[in-house]
Image (tube, rainbow, N blue to C red):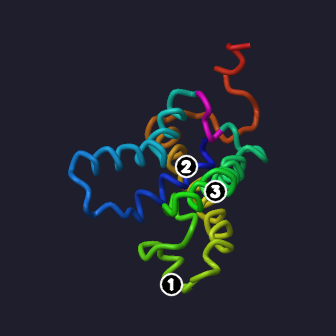
Amino acid sequence: MYSSAFGGWIGLLWSENEELPFIELFVYYLEHFFTSFGGPLILSLSGRYDPLTYTKFPLPVFGFHLFVMYMRWVLTPLSLLTWANLNHTLCGVDNDPIYVIFELGETYYMWADVYLGAACYLALGANLAICYIVKRLILGDKSGFTTTPTEHDKKSK
């Protein structure tokens, strides 16, 4: 979950919903708040699925690989069938800064996985930093980065 939060971050930073009514905008930003950092922070504070605990490879990158499979095996065929640009799988859009700055044009589809992979790692780092700051510095939780099971994991066995 933590490694797939980059989609929520991208939705918060580069949305394309100017013509939506207020209630839809509210729901859109609420959904993206929880998928970007709100949900991971809540799960981290609860002690379950804490990104500060589960940092051992391959867990941090697994979400991105699932995302790529979903994009290529589910959304792309649906986009080709319906000609709806689902999650920008058919072509880039003008509010995508990478698409515009580098003028990707027809090469967008090939480069999208590269820069979305970079966005995955940036969002993962941002969520780790947010959870660390809130848990360690603000709330004073003294447990550090570890790859061992948490106390909650040990109790549930």
Which part of the image, by quadrant, shows the C terminus?
A: top right
Q: Which residue is mark 3?
A: 77
Name above or below for residue 61 compared with residue 106.
above
Q: Nearer the viewer, residue 135 or 20?
A: 20
Work out whether mark 2 precedes mark 1 in sequence or the reverse, and give the earlier one: 2
Mark 1 vs mark 3: which is more N-terminal? 3
Q: What label sits on residue 5 in the rendered view?
A: 2
Magenta stretch holds residue 51: yes
Residue 67 magenta? no
Residues under numbered marks 1 and 3 in contact, where contact means CB atoms less than 8 Å apart: no
| Residue at the outermost front position | 81
> What amino acid type should be assigned to the residue bearing mark 2?
Ala
Relative to residue 19, is residue 91 drawn left or right?
right
> Mark 1 highlights which residue?
101
Q: Work out how far the residue at label 1 is from the one at label 3, CA to CA, in angstroms.
A: 28 Å
Report helix, strand or loop for mark 3: helix
Distance from the alpha carbon under mark 3 to that under mark 2: 24 Å
Residue for point 40% across, 44% down:
31
Circle 3 Cα neighbour tier, 10 Å, few/some/many (<14 / 14–19 / ≥20): some
Q: Which residues are magenta?
A: 48-52
